[in-house]
Image (cartoon, rainbow, N blue to C red):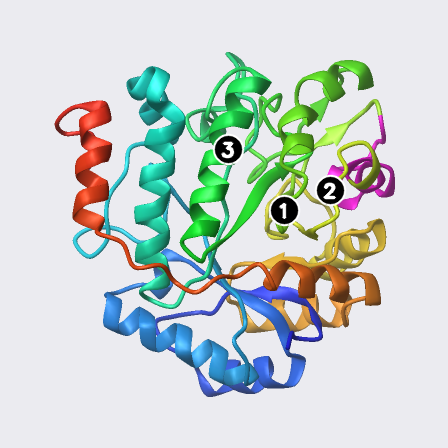
Amino acid sequence: MIGSGAAIFGCEGLSLTAAERDFFRDYDPLGFIIFARNVANPQQLSRLTAELRDSVGRYAPILVDQEGGRVQRLRAPYWSEWAAPLDTVEQAGANAAHAMALRSMVIAAELRAVGIDANCAPVADIGGPRTHPFLRNRCYGQDAATVTKIARAVADAHLEMGVLPVVKHMPGHGRSINDTHLDLPTVTTDRATLNATDFAPFRALADLPMAMTAHIIFSAYDSLPATQSPAMIQAIRDEIGFKGLLMTDDLNMQALEGTLGQRTARSIAAGCDIALHCKGDMAEMLEVATAAGTMTEAARARATAALAQRRPAKSVDIVALKAEFSSLLGEGAHG
């Protein structure tokens, strides 16, 4: 059973308000996303994830950004702290894929323990010397083969532990020299080069259940940001071969122009399945919901297939996993 609304929403605080419960019940979004403002401790977070699902009367997917480093919503003292992904990759050297798989297993186990069953990872963007700092140390490497190998290990570890991976940022964010939270970058690289480099990890990961778009213009395809570009969404489906559920990156990011309703409508019209709104502001959620409407038949089929890949939570020895991880990197590899 899945929702009907073509959106994923955040909520305002540590528990649902009556207005949020009523809105979620009436609109029935596909799922929800958790941010640091929603997190106090494991007991509270478990109650909140249960409240979110109760509001729609089903086991809706609940997402989070738990990459490690700066992008980590659940933190110490209740959850493991991790270095930025690129720091771990560089420290682990030849063992990078295994190290990232181990830490992903721990992350996924900790997420499932509080009712979260989807993580916005792996990051399959290729980092480079000009990649904006907001993204660069979140990447796994500087070439397609390295990024693909590690991203696959991260994705498989999440799936094994019962957490759906959301690969990002399709079709590739690494050439951006701007922070899309603030500006809209334009990439002028030609199609052949993009297909051989930036698009390659996503093509290799095209079997994954869910993906998130990039708010970037690829001038070889369109003058619109990928999230709102029919040509770019078509390339994601045809050239990259991704058949899974495609959600926007957060629609509040300032790379996109117009009202939230306009941003939402353009993204859905371009071919995105789901509008992602993270802020938890009720007036904004109402605007997004009105513009997003209900999922198309194709989006519902992709959502159903994606959620069918959820597995039962796997019981693991987190202490042993952390010890093996530390042995690959040396003492003090994580907090």
| Vertical relation: 334 (above or below) 93 | below
Q: Are marks 3 and 2 in contact (CB under 8 Å)?
A: no
| Quadrant hosting residue 303 | bottom right
Distance between the Cα atoms at labels 1 and 2?
Answer: 9 Å
The answer to whether residue 271 is left or right of residue 35 is right
Quadrant housing residue 144: top right
Instruction: Give above or below for 310 relative to 20.
Output: above
Residue pointed to by mark 2: 242
Amino acid type at image mark 1? Ala
Q: Which residue is mark 1?
A: 211
Percent coordinates x, y for residue 260 in the rendering: 69, 58
Cα distance between the residues tagged 3 and 2: 15 Å
Task: Give, as a three-letter code, the residue at label 3.
Answer: Ala
Q: What's the magenta region?
A: 221-236
- Which secondary structure lies at badge 2? loop
Q: Are marks 1 and 2 in contact (CB under 8 Å)?
A: yes
The residue sitting at 70% across, 51% down in the picture is 244
| Residue position for label 3 | 151
**Secondary structure state at the residue bearing disc 1:** strand
Mark 1 or mark 2, which is nearer to you? 2
Residue 335 in view (yes/no): no
Quadrant where the C terminus sits is top left
Local packing at callout 1 (Cα closer than 10 Å; few below 14, some 14-19, many 20+) is: many
How far across and how far down the image is residue 24, in percent? 58, 80
Q: Nearer the viewer, mark 1 or mark 3?
A: 3
The secondary element bearing badge 3 is classed as helix
